[in-house]
Amino acid sequence: SVSGLQAGNEYVAVLLASNDLGHVSSSVPVSFATGGACYVATNGNDSAAGTASAPFLTIAHAISAATVGDTIFVTPGVYGITAEIAVDKVVSILGTTGNPEDVIVRRTSGSVRVFKISADALVAGLTVENGDYPAQNFQSSRANCGGGGIYMTAGTVSNCVIRGNMVNADT
């Protein structure tokens, strides 16, 4: 465990592997960056600071305010969206309880998917539901289809519930 590091800085450490007698078998330099944190809550405000005591209202705004390496903590509740959430930065978006049923992100109107992940980001501990992606030229080409709940070209989705999403094909 390391403490006292400042968010947003890059550090280099040396990792040592040893046996019970303390003999070092190898050492490897390891580089890592520390990120900051921001919070999202159903009673938040996108004009707030994004702290635990003054959280943002929307995940999309938190991503916009984040820098590479930040963690966005999403508190329990239901988050209705009317526009796709573009995850285009290397960030972690985490439900604070770890139980995906506690944090629900759902489309409330319009034909939009819930998340589009195009960066090496992590989305974990959320439920993603009711996405509705309108496929273009579905009959002639399946290439224009994408996930109704999540469409990703990079990143990781872990410990999430994805339900009730659809691709709405034209005829």
Image (cartoon, grey):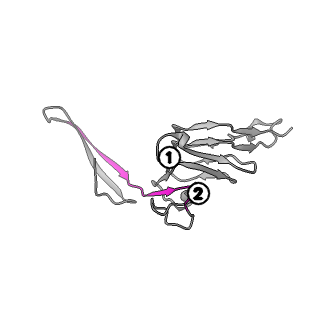
Q: Residue furthest top?
A: 20
Q: Which residues are magenta?
A: 25-44
Which dot marks residue 58? 2
Q: Taking 56 as reference, is 136 above or below it?
A: above
Cβ atoms at labels 1 and 2 below 8 Å apart: no
Q: Is residue 10 magenta?
A: no
The Cα atoms of the two marked residues, 1 and 2, are separated by 13 Å
Q: Residue at x 56, y 43 (%)?
A: 154
Image location (x, y in percent) of residue 11: 32, 55
Whether residue 91 is visible to the viewer of this picture, yes or no, is no
- Dot 1: what SS? strand
Q: Residue at x 56, y 59 (%)?
A: 43
For disc 1, the marked residue is: 95
Q: Residue at x 28, y 47 (%)?
A: 1
Image location (x, y in percent) of residue 155: 53, 43
Image location (x, y in percent) of residue 169: 80, 38
Query: Is 68 in front, or is 48?
Result: 48
Say left or right for 129 vs 171: left
Q: Residue at x 83, y 35 (%)?
A: 139
Predominant SS of the magenta segment: strand
Image location (x, y in percent) of residue 128: 61, 42
Please name the amino acid that badge 2 sits on: Thr
Q: Residue furthest bottom?
A: 47
